[in-house]
Image (cartoon, rainbow, N blue to C red):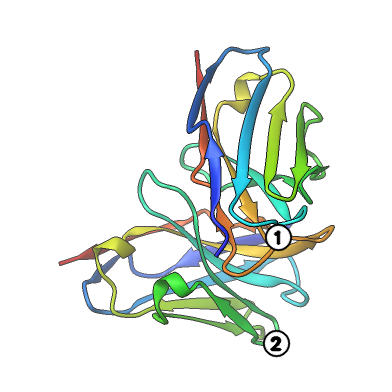
């Protein structure tokens, strides 16, 4: 059974860099699209971006170039960095596996989520 | 960017009711649409992909339909475990995007 687990600081100061890591167990990282998705408290879901196993990335332009996703397949991990954070970046951050089901890229395995609060 | 708009934002229903949730895309997304269920304190769970294909292990009371810009998720007979928030997600173009969610509440 594939499992994902986020780790990283739960509190980040405004203007600093948010850094999270997702550890993947129970399956290979090959052929999938390793994603970060966030959910502000009480709100909906926002896709931040993904990386595949060879390091190709796509990011959501709404974050204005502040996002970097990297992968370390030797450790079965991928990571998220969001720089210059502000209060609006306070959210529950999920890592998720993107899979092609039929013709659609869907998120079929998710971590439990980690709450990151940006403090002033 | 493709904007996804769900309606209604919430629906009150009873066990056994038929529930229908709509999702509209701002541009044609063919059938590149998925539906998720999210329960409080949990990550979302994939229900439907390719607009109408049921994910393995998902009860057959869930069904999806539509193509282009208009999509529907139907729960044929609502069960107690189905009270949750439902999201549509498009995978037609970057950035991938979700609807704002529809909360199915107890009537």
Of the two numbered discs 2 and 1 in the rendering, the one whose residue sits closer to the viewer: 2
Residue located beneath label 2 in the image: A54
The image position of residue B83, as x and y in percent, is 56, 26
Q: Residue at x 21, y 72 (%)?
A: A13
B47 with respect to A18 (left or right): right
Please state, as top left, top right, bottom left or bottom right, where the C terminus of chain A lies in the image. bottom left
Q: Is residue A91 above or below residue A20?
A: above
Left of A88 or right of it: where is B35? right
Image side of residue B25 versus residue A112, left or right: right
Task: Residue A9: give x, y in percent of width and height.
Answer: 34, 69
Between A6 and A50, the residue placed more toward the observer is: A50
* Residue A76 vertical position relative to residue B101 in the rendered view, above or below: below
Q: Residue at x 66, y 19 (%)?
A: B79
Q: Is residue A99 above or below residue A66?
A: above
Quarter containing the N terminus of chain A:
bottom right
Dot 1 falls on a residue whose secondary structure is loop
Identify the residue position indicated by label 1 in the image: A2
Of B63 and A68, nearer the camera is B63
Q: Chain of mark 1?
A: A
Q: Counting other residues with Cα less than 10 Å from the Cα at mark 1, is it few (<14), some (14-19), or many (20 or more)?
A: few
The one nearer the camera, B53 or A77, is B53
């Amino acid at each position: 059974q594939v499992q994902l687990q986020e780790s990283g600081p739960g509190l980040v100061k405004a203007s600093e860099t948010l850094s999270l890591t997702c550890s993947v167990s129970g399956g290979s990282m090959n052929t999938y699209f390793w994603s970060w998705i966030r959910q502000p408290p009480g709100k909906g879901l926002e896709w931040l971006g993904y990386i595949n196993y060879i390091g190709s990335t796509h990011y959501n332009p709404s974050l204005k170039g502040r996002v970097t996703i990297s992968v370390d397949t030797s450790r079965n991990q991928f990571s998220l960095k969001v720089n210059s954070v502000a209060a609006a970046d306070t959210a529950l951050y999920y890592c998720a596996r993107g899979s092609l089901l039929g013709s659609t890229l869907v998120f079929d395995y998710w971590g439990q989520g980690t709450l990151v609060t940006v403090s002033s | 960017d493709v904007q996804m708009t769900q309606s209604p934002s919430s629906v009150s229903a009873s066990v056994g009711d038929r529930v229908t949730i709509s999702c509209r895309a701002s541009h044609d997304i063919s059938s590149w649409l998925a539906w998720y269920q999210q329960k409080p304190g949990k990550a979302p769970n994939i229900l439907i992909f390719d607009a109408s294909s049921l994910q393995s292990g998902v009860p057959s009371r869930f069904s999806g339909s539509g193509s282009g810009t208009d999509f529907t998720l139907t729960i044929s007979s609502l069960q107690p475990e189905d009270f949750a928030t439902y999201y549509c997600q498009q995978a037609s173009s970057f950035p991938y995007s979700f609807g704002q969610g529809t909360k199915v509440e107890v009537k």
